[in-house]
Image (cartoon, rainbow, N blue to C red):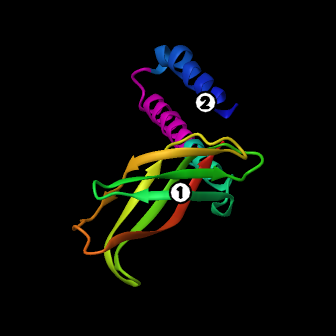
């Protein structure tokens, strides 16, 4: 609603007032102020809707299962959305890869991952994506990993 008011105000200034005062400095000040207010409003509105989307589904309602990682940096598994009301649209993960021989594990690499998948409430969907890592050396043992959900987005 406020967006339409800004647009209408802008059109009134440009169409009605501009021809009368186009050489006046006050006209340009008013025009610049309206444009600046419109830009600030649209930026605030976009950020506000993104913040709301990030608060819809807590990380505790997301479960990652059947996770697999291969040396070619492909990370796959299942995402379960336990929310009863909202569809998951994006998931941000931090993945720590360790090289393990028996139970002796050493840090190998760490990376961030964004998964864009639509997971409706109460459903599970597979994902298969490349993981961006700092560096990754061939393991002496086997890879193990830990994941942390950094954020969720939903609608």
Residue at 68% in and 58% down: 61
Mark whose residue sits in front, 2 or 1: 1
Which mark, by number, is residue 66? 1
Residue 58: x and y in percent read 67, 59
Residue at the bottom extreme of this rendering: 104
Q: Secondary structure at mark 2?
A: helix
Residue 134: x and y in percent read 27, 65
- Relative placement, left or right, of 65 versus 29 is right
Image: magenta residue range: 22-44
Dominant secondary structure (helix, strand or loop) of the stretch shown in magenta:
helix
Callout 1 crowding tier (Cα within 10 Å): few <14, some 14–19, many ≥20 = few
Residue 25: name its quadrant: top left
Q: Secondary structure at mark 1?
A: strand
Dot 2 and dot 1 residues touching (CB under 8 Å): no
Q: Nearer the viewer, residue 63 or 116?
A: 63
- Relative placement, left or right, of 49 versus 98 is right
26 is higher (above) or lower (below) than 45: above
Q: Is residue 35 magenta?
A: yes
User: What is the tally of numbered marks visible in this picture?
Assistant: 2
Residue under pointer 2: 6
148 is higher (above) or lower (below) than 62: below
> For the C terminus, which image quadrant?
top right
Callout 2 crowding tier (Cα within 10 Å): few <14, some 14–19, many ≥20 = some
């Amino acid at each position: 609603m406020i967006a339409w008011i800004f647009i209408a105000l802008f059109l009134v200034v440009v169409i009605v007032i501009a021809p009368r005062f186009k050489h006046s400095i006050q006209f340009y000040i008013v025009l610049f102020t309206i444009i600046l207010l419109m830009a600030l409003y649209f930026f605030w509105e976009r950020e506000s809707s993104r913040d709301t989307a990030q608060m819809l589904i807590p990380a505790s309602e997301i479960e990652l299962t059947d996770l697999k990682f291969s040396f070619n940096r492909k990370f796959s598994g299942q995402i379960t959305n336990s929310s009863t009301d909202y569809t998951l649209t994006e998931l941000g993960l931090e993945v720590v890869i360790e090289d393990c021989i028996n139970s002796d594990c050493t840090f190998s690499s760490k990376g961030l991952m964004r998964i864009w998948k639509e997971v409706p409430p109460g459903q599970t969907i597979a994902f298969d994506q490349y993981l961006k890592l700092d560096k990754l050396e061939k393991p002496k043992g086997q890879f193990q990993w830990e994941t942390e959900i950094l954020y969720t987005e939903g609608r």
